[in-house]
Amino acid sequence: MGKWSPPTGTADIGADEISEWKLLESTAEKIFPLYGYSELRTPVFEYTEVFSKGLGDQTEVVQKEMYTFEDRGGRSLTLRPEGTAGIIRSLAATDVMNGNEKKVFYYGPMFRGEKPAAGRRRQFHQIGVESVGKVNSTLDAESIAMLMRYLEELGLSNSKLMLSTRGSSEDRETAEKELYKYFSEHISQMCDDCRKRINSNIWRILDCKEERCQKFINSAPDLVSQFSDESRNYFKRVCKELDSIGIKYEYAPKMVRGLDYYEHTVFEIIHEGLGAQDSIAGGGRYHLDLPRMKKPMKGVGFALGMERLIMARKSMKLESDSKQSCDIYLVALGENANNKSFSIAEKLRKNNLSVQSSFENKSMKAQMRAANRNSAKFALIIGDSELENKKYTFKNMKNGDQTELTEEDLIDYFKN
Ligand code: HAM
């Protein structure tokens, strides 16, 4: 780690990649409103209980990964590890509680104290959406359709949609007993982590990557077939609705979503260009409970990992050119020219031209080199004779052509 590196698991986002980030954001701003979603910005920290209650006490995120601190008044605050809980906290104050639907999208930094790896950071960024207040299988299908549309717009239609259902909380209680019965017979041959998971969060066993656990996981009972008719029919409707608009998916009955608030539909998007952290998005239907809320709020949504989207686009050689060029580089020769170049620069910028200059008394050669370094399209040379004649040498940096122009000519040149 270098002396000036940012904290482990975080990164600076510089000029060389900022256009990719803006593209992800502007594409969200273009696609999501077509489905009736509007933007909502919530704070990057919340009272800790919003997450501990909202995401579930037993989730790995709450138990091991949250950045929690006390403020000066002794209140416990946490940097948001995900966006959904804060969005629900914000919407709880609106008429969504009376059954009025709200559709919102958001983007920004999230924080999880995970072990950093390629595609896994401690400060990462998500683009997310939530449709809150109504339960309807068509809304689940619509949310997935919007996600696929977003990916298509970014050139990532080769992503794979994995789809499953977690059933209702009653279904899960029955399923959990079934899982416990099955795994307790094999747990002595499984890894240490799974031995802990069997009592703390048995579902995570299904997500274990250890070689020795795989055969037991693969032969685990089919839980979905034991869900209630109502839950299975709900899922069938979602599948049928996706079929009706030609969205392809792979049924993944053993999919584990890391957060506890999910019920019924769950999904993930996998992109093969990513290696081990191959999930670029995840989501599903949820019921989220917050402190002092009379009943859980129901919704459906998803979040995309922005770092991973950019990696996926890179793997497909889709990344946009971030190199910033400048329209005009002012080459000023001498003290008077320097003063003049400062005022010319302002005038040109008022006409929406991007202008740079060193404002230093350097040689012509050094300043022309700087113009090239800044990818300038044109150079304007201001020397003593130019100041006297009020006509400046205007040089095309690409083909070397030169002409003499007044300030007004210059502005007209760009206007035309
Ligand atoms: P999640 O699956 O925890 O879901 O995260 C969604 C996406 O965020 C992941 O698929 C991944 O691309 C990205 N991500 C997660 N952790 C990291 C990390 N440490 N580094 C880089 N990228 C990461 C949620 O957060 C839910 N709130 C999604 C949701 C919204 N469900 C319903 N509504």
Image (cartoon, rainbow, N blue to C red):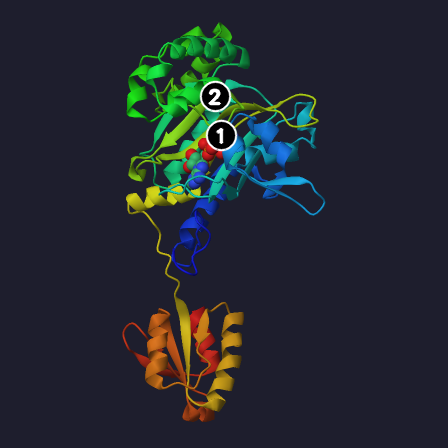
Amino acid type of the residue tagged 2 in the rendering = Asn
> Where 50 falls versus 141 (above or below)?
below
Q: Nearer the viewer, residue 138 or 68?
A: 68
- Callouts 2 and 1 close, C-beta under 8 Å: yes
Q: Secondary structure at mark 2?
A: loop
The N terminus is located in which quarter?
Answer: bottom left
In primary-sequence order, the first of circles 2 and 1 is 1
Residue located at (35% from left, 56% from top): 321
Residue 376 is situated, as x and y percent measured from the top left of the image, at 37, 71
Figure check: 410 above or below 206: below
User: Which label is found at residue 60?
Assistant: 1
Camera-side residue: 327 or 224?
A: 224
Question: Along the line of sight, which residue is nearer the eye, 371 or 344?
Answer: 371
Q: Quadrant of residue 114?
A: top left
Q: Quadrant of the C terminus?
A: bottom left
Tag 2: Cα neighbours inside 10 Å, few (<14), some, or many (≥20)?
Answer: some
The residue beneath circle 2 is: 201
Q: Mark 1 is on which residue type?
A: Glu
Name which residue lies at 37% across and 37% down: 152
Q: Quadrant of residue 180?
A: top left
Residue at 70%, 32% (x, y): give it.
93
- Estimate the spatial distance between the alpha carbons at disc 2 and disc 1, rounded to whole Å: 9 Å
**Label 2 lies in ligand 1 vicinity (Cβ under 8 Å):** no
